[in-house]
Amino acid sequence: MAFDEGVAQRIREALGDRPDIAEKKMFGGIAFMHSGNMCCGVVGGVLMARVGPDAYADALRRPNTREMDFTGRALKGFVYVDPAGFDEDSELRKWINLCLAFTGSLPAK
């Protein structure tokens, strides 16, 4: 599956030149790794957001989100955000900051 390069570029710009961020192809799209941990990414035009278990229920209550069920089972702590949920750069940054807050609490890999 291809990914929307425009969305990936918006994520790159929001993340800036952080030395602890790397890109990796996974889930049929592209993922942004934070200190070796999957943080966020793009599959098709959909944002993959790793919000963690504590923010998971709240994230699912936000508009344009759903469980990330890439394997047919929901991955707890991960949500898909449809394009309408991050069409504004400020909304995309909110999602990315939520992801970074969680992955920043994990040990580096």
Image (tube, grey):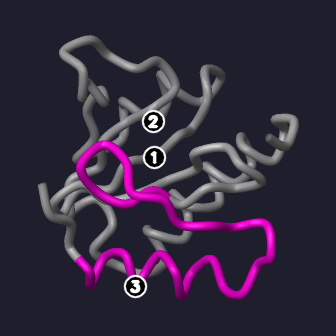
Three-letter amino acid code of the residue under disc 2:
Ala
Residue at 29% x, 49% y is 81
* Magenta span: 5-31
Q: Nearer the viewer, mark 2 or mark 3?
A: 3
The image shows residue 47 at horizontal and vertical percentages of: 33, 56
* Dot 1 and dot 2 residues touching (CB under 8 Å): yes
User: SS of the residue at dot 3?
Assistant: helix
Q: Nearer the viewer, mark 1 or mark 2?
A: 1
Residue assigned mark 2: 59
User: SS of the residue at dot 1?
Assistant: strand
Residue assigned mark 3: 9
Three-letter amino acid code of the residue under disc 1:
Ala
The image shows residue 54 at horizontal and vertical percentages of: 65, 22
Measured Cα–Cα span from mark 2 to mark 3 = 23 Å
**Quick check: 53 above or below 68?**
above
The image shows residue 50 at horizontal and vertical percentages of: 53, 40
